[in-house]
Amino acid sequence: MWRKMIVLFLIVHLLSFGNTEGEKVHKIFPPGPLKVMLFLNPECPVSNAYMKEIKSIYADYSAKGVSFEAYFPMETVTEKDIKAFLKKYNATFPGFPDPGLRKATRYQATVMPEVVLLNENGITVYQGAIDNWFYALGKSRPRATELYLRNALEATLNGNPIMQSKTQAIGCLINMKLD
């Protein structure tokens, strides 16, 4: 018992000390990579329309160490449906069902497509629309003029503040259960 307590004390003690420059030592448990969580729906026309841009963002930023995960917050979607959807668009990031809407509820996602950018400590630093291509349901510009997710990724990767940390996503609603 005492040995375990001493070992635990030493680990905590080592992790709490800084190096000679006063920086915290992160060599034992380094922070994880940035993560983009995508909330998608294979039956949503807006989700489908965004797949080309999502794949482009994935290609550009997965090469910079950013991880991507897609969640499908519908009770009726199966793993087979998800695989077929990702295959249809040649998307290589992982996709998961969201049973009970746990991820959607945790991150307060309300629309598909909606993105959540988590920093290396798992804290949400951006949430909302991918860009401003769609400005209302069924209404889109010829091309986006504001690249919200790309700007947030660039700022975070470069250690700069994010100028706009929350936007309103446009798309199909996530059917949340009201209790």
Image (cartoon, grey):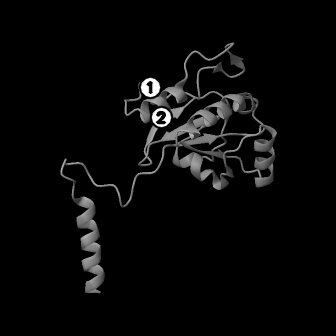
Say which residue appears at 28% left-offset and 55% top-offset: 25
Judge the density around disc 2: few (<14), some (14-19), many (≥20) Cα neighbours within 10 Å. Answer: many
Q: Which residue is mark 2?
A: 126
The mark nearer the N terminus, 1 or 2, is: 2
Q: Is residue 179 visible?
A: no
Observer-nearest of 60 and 101: 60
Observer-nearest of 114 and 142: 142
Q: Which residue ends up furthest to the top in the rendered image?
A: 142
The residues tagged by marks 1 and 2 sit, at their Cα atoms, a distance apart of 8 Å
- The reply to whether callout 1 and callout 2 are in contact (CB within 8 Å) is yes
Type of amino acid at the residue the image marks with label 1? Gln
Q: Where residue 137 appears, x then y in whole percent?
A: 68, 22
Q: Which residue is mark 1?
A: 164
User: Which quarter of the picture shows residue 99?
Assistant: bottom right
Judge the density around disc 1: few (<14), some (14-19), many (≥20) Cα neighbours within 10 Å. Answer: some
> What SS does tag 2 mark?
strand
Say which residue appears at 51% left-offset and 35% top-offset: 127
The quarter in which the N terminus is drawn is bottom left
Q: Where residue 79 appears, x then y in whole percent?
A: 76, 54
